[in-house]
Image (cartoon, rainbow, N blue to C red):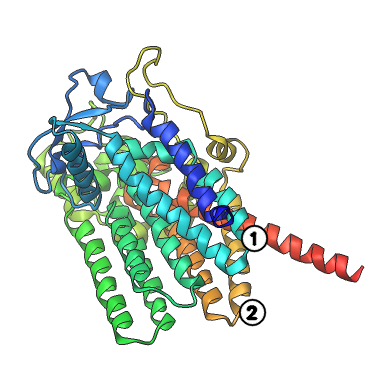
């Protein structure tokens, strides 16, 4: 019995459990302070602040307790699967102590359960297929994804937490299926459930949801029975529906905000010819005075809150037109991607990480258990060249390994890594096209997750290959 417990998937789950409890549950609790986005989820789940001061609500402190009221459907202006997660946490909170007060640690508990399940499946799948490589995967996974910069989002209403845990769950279920001699139906359902919650967490994730569907269809080859194939088709349809719903339910105000950021805080920011860019986009060149401004400033040279201005932006700007502009001016796109690379490895946004507590100053940023996030920020090159070389090298190795391995399970594992790689590439470019340079490091969160999954896989792969070559060398020399 003791030997059965000493397995990498169990050790990694226990290690992460203790880290998460220490960081998220013990006071003063660690989370991420509200930058104004919480209202999008709070309105839809019936939550409201019980603090009144601006500094107590925004940017500086994490609010641990919220009042519980009546939910307003789509009260935040769009659909998100995060609503269901928060609603579940509220239900658990009121079931345990029906006080009308919601403690956000119930939400981090829900994320903790999904996170540990995902980590367990990832390590178990690797261990079953490559034995002792599971220990490497366990160590790297705990080090990277139990980093405070990641798990602090669990005590918040940001969509980043949903994105992280359900992408990991999707990958974990896929890896476990790829390593199983007899794939189980419940694991297949878990794969698509993770994909659905991941795709619907934020509208930015919608394209990745469609990539997950393509990956899901490759699972049909694992079993030949009709039930398996029907489950794949029905589940894939559900993921597509969630992705589409997430996109089409965005309110007009949010769309206008994103379009404004894309043009004036994206294309026109540091533009050599703002007036010419505006003419090319079909907008009034007199708006050149707005170049470099964002949508949340107090004063503007032109009144951007008028119905006429909003109508012009909404009717004349779309993401296809923005993408077309950058295709015509590739050097401008490269400049923006260089900015994205510079901001792309920053997981901590500078918001307060602690609840208001004796001895905790306003906007204090936690730095405990942050080895990985600090390593990325301080050591890795923040350049487009490094990002391009890393992704290109990863893709080359992936292609070579896919072609040289005829085993269906190994190839499925490679497809999972390909899904993560394509998602990372998309999420490196889409924030620039979708929102300019506004909150760029925060919008690159999913890129960070994909990069870290790839980096973790690369570490395990390189160490395993090194040991293989070393064994061959010792054998023959």
Q: Nearer the viewer, residue 193 or 163?
A: 193
**Which residue does the numbered mark 1 point to in the structure image?**
132
Residue 403 falls in image quadrant: bottom right
Q: Nearer the viewer, mark 1 or mark 2?
A: 1
Q: Could you tell whether 129 is left or right of 323 in the image?
A: right
Graded by Cα atoms within 10 Å as few (under 14), some (14 to 19) or many (20 or more), the crowding at tag 2 reads: few
Task: Work out whether mark 1 precedes mark 2 in sequence or the reverse, and give the earlier one.
Answer: 1
- Residue 301 picture location, percent across and down: 24, 30
Tag 2 secondary structure:
helix
- Residue 89 picture location, percent across and down: 23, 43
Residue 97 falls in image quadrant: top left
Q: Could you tell whether 383 is left or right of 120 in the image?
A: right
Q: CA distance from mark 1 to mark 2?
A: 22 Å
Image quarter hosting the C terminus: bottom right
The structure residue drawn at horizontal position 39% and vertical position 44%, both measured from the top left corner, is 273
Q: Nearer the viewer, residue 23 or 72?
A: 23
* C-beta proximity under 8 Å, tags 1 and 2: no
Tag 1 secondary structure:
loop
Seen as rendered, the residue at the extreme right is 477
Seen as rendered, the residue at the extreme front is 1
Q: Is residue 226 above or below residue 173?
A: below
Q: Is residue 392 above or below residue 382?
A: below
- Residue 430 picture location, percent across and down: 38, 54
Graded by Cα atoms within 10 Å as few (under 14), some (14 to 19) or many (20 or more), the crowding at tag 1 reads: some
Image quarter hosting the N terminus: bottom right
- Residue 320 picture location, percent across and down: 30, 61
Q: Nearer the viewer, residue 154 or 284?
A: 154
Q: Nearer the viewer, residue 428 or 102?
A: 102
**Which residue does the numbered mark 2 point to in the structure image?**
404
């Amino acid at each position: 019995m003791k030997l059965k417990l000493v397995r990498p998937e169990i050790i990694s789950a226990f290690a992460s459990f203790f880290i998460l409890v220490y960081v998220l549950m013990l006071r003063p609790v660690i989370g991420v302070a509200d930058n104004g986005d919480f209202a999008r989820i709070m309105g839809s789940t019936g939550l409201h602040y019980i603090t009144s001061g601006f500094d107590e609500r925004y940017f500086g402190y994490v609010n641990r307790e919220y009042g519980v009221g009546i939910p307003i459907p789509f009260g935040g202006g769009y659909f998100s699967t995060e609503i269901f997660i928060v609603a579940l946490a509220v239900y658990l909170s009121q079931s345990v102590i029906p006080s009308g007060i919601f403690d956000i640690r119930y939400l981090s508990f829900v994320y903790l359960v999904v996170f540990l399940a995902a980590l367990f499946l990832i390590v178990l799948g690797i261990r079953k297929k490559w034995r002792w490589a599971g220990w490497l995967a366990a160590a790297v996974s705990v080090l990277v994804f139990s980093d405070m910069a990641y798990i602090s989002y669990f005590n918040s209403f940001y969509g980043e937490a949903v994105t992280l845990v359900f992408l990991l769950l999707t990958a974990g279920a896929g890896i476990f299926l790829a390593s199983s001699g007899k794939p189980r139906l419940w694991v297949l359902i878990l794969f698509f459930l993770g994909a659905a919650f991941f795709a619907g967490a934020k509208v930015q994730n919608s394209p990745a949801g469609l990539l997950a569907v393509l990956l899901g269809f490759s699972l049909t080859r694992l079993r030949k029975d009709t039930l398996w194939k029907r489950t794949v088709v029905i589940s894939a349809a559900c993921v597509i529906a969630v992705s589409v719903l997430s996109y089409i339910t965005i309110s007009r105000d949010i769309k206008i905000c994103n379009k404004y950021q894309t043009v004036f805080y994206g294309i026109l920011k540091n533009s050599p010819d703002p007036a010419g860019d505006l003419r090319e986009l079909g907008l009034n060149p007199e708006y050149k005075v707005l170049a470099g401004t964002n949508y949340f400033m107090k004063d503007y040279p032109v009144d951007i809150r008028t119905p006429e201005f909003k109508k012009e932006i909404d009717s004349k700007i779309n993401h296809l037109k923005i993408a077309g502009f950058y295709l015509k001016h590739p050097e401008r796109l490269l400049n923006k991607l260089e900015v994205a690379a510079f901001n792309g490895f920053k997981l901590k946004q500078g918001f307060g990480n602690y609840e208001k507590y004796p001895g905790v100053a306003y906007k204090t940023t936690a730095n405990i258990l942050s080895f990985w996030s600090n390593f990325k920020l301080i050591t890795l090159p923040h350049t487009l060249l490094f990002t391009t070389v890393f992704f290109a090298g990863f893709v080359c190795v992936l292609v070579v390994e896919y072609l040289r391995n005829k085993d269906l399970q190994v190839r499925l594992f490679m497809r999972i890594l390909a899904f993560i790689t394509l998602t990372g590439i998309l999420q490196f470019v889409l924030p620039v096209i979708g929102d300019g340079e506004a909150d760029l490091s925060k919008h690159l969160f999913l890129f960070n997750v994909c990069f870290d999954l790839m980096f973790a896989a690369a570490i395990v792969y390189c160490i395993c290959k090194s040991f293989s070559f070393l064994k061959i060398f010792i054998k023959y020399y």
